Image (tube, rainbow, N blue to C red):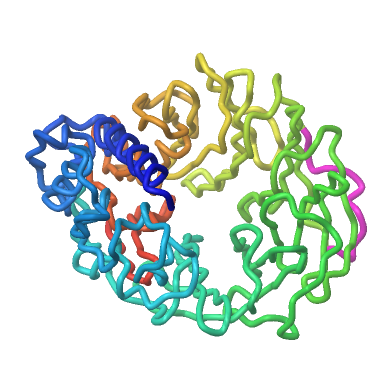
Amino acid sequence: MPTVFRGLALASLFAVLFVACQTADCCSSAAPSEQCPLLLDPAKASCAGDSCAAKDASCEATASCTKGADCKAEGTTCPMTGAKSDCGSCPSEKGGKDDCDSCPSEKGGKDDCGSCPSEKAPAGLLSTLAACGATEVWSAKRFDGCCVIDMFAADNELFALVAGPDGYEVHCIDLLTGVPRWLTNIGAIGLRTRLTVGDALVVCLLEDGAGMVVMKRRNGSITERRSVPMKLVPMGGAASSTSTVYVASLGDNAVHAINPADGLDGWRWRTEGRLFGAPVMTPATPRRLVVLAADNGEVVALPTSGWDEGRPAQAAWSRKLLGPMGGPVATYGSVTKSGSSTVVIAPCEDHGLYCLDGASGESRWVHRTDSAFRSQPQAAGGKVFAVNASGMQVVDIATGAELWTDAAKAPGQTFRQAKRMLAANATTVYMTCGKGVGRLDAKTGKLLGCTDLLGVDFVVETGDAGLLVGATRCGQISVLR
């Protein structure tokens, strides 16, 4: 690369890092002395507070870069990580041959993770997450020789998609104990969307129209050990019942009921408006339904008719919001002394957050603010968490009454990125905020602890499980409460 262009590129990088170091938000509601180093002035930062695991190294690296030092020439520390690099340059600057070809976060390929500067030992990962005040449940190293692509939780199980030497694997781990349950190799083709987990089936929609792979949730076995072809273009992930896979297709704006064994297309259902995202399932009690949302504000719930039972004669219920749909809907179920309850939460452009009865579709409440809701809400711990231009809105799921709000966000990030509920119970909420995670009082929203996420590649939503889960691409996993 010509010297002048290389100089311009490095100058641009330093400018971006300078702005990020000056404005990035770990947990913006914390006092300045408690915030993580990237929020502080690099030239004056003392990195006070125990909540920042790599405070000294991070401040040194940040300060050296904002002062105009050439990281590539120095070859000592990499900006934003503070970790020693085996490369001749910082990862974000490299353009030529170097020793970092194996880093999954840089190259996306297979690796041994030995030289990736962002990786931490289990103890380092645990101490980083524990800095917000959480306590360890279990920590372990999993998936030797593989690179983690995605990780998420469903009920009390942790699912990971990893790239290994023989293709992609799906791993199922007990969330509460860390004990591996099963692993299944799904072949050499990656996933189009995140795999979806139902009561009985785990569905993987493959890239490039390669179809889908369906596994049994209890043991990971694949019917006939082959991919199932599909003649449709999936709109997001799939939903499933015990016998049928439901996929929304971009091609004909319809939800298709599919045989999981051979991919045979059964019945289909179209809404009046254009479908808004993938179908979602309500909890099993009082009855399982397939919920569809359309951009015109229409919400429809269908019976879970099998793929070979014929198209349902009519919807279980249908409701029309007072404005266009602002984002995908969410469902939530709870069991109390008075019985089970299921709700559908719908975000709307008319500044309303709608709660519909999951069994009947009747309106339970509408929470209105000064801004439109344009992202999928979340629900856990008897609360709904929804983001709009005013920030995170937290309301009581039973009444729709506002509990507390958090208006802070990280500069340069969308509200969904800046504020994301990870887990919630009656006393504690874990929430991402910019490049950090905070532990908050569930009743008041008061910040109880905060930590930066340097070196943490995944933070997992566990909802009602109330657990904070962090992991790295190399398979280090720590679960805290």
- Can you say whether 250 is above or below 182 in the image? above
Instruction: Name the residue nearer the viewer: 299 or 362.
Output: 299
Instruction: Name the residue nearer the viewer: 410 or 71.
Output: 71
Q: Is residue 413 left or right of residue 120?
A: right
Please tell me whether residue 76 belongs to the stretch shown in magenta. no
Q: Position of residue 329 (x, y in %)?
A: 63, 39
Q: Residue at x 18, y 59 (%)?
A: 76
Please tell me whether residue 308 belongs to the stretch shown in magenta. yes
Q: Residue at x 16, y 32 (%)?
A: 41
- Can you say whether 456 is above or below 121 in the image? above
Q: Position of residue 107 (x, y in %)?
A: 46, 64
- Can you say whether 97 is above or below 342 in the image? below
Q: Position of residue 374 (x, y in %)?
A: 58, 29
Q: Where's the C terminus, which quadrant?
A: bottom left
Q: Is residue 101 left or right of residue 163?
A: left
Instruction: Name the residue nearer the viewer: 16 or 299.
Output: 16
Q: Residue at x 76, y 31 (%)?
A: 298
Magenta span covers which residues?
307-318
- Can you say whether 454 is above or below 230 in the image? above
Q: Is residue 246 left or right of residue 416?
A: right
Q: In the current view of this chain or complex, which residue is farthest to the top?
A: 370
Residue 129 in view in this figure? no
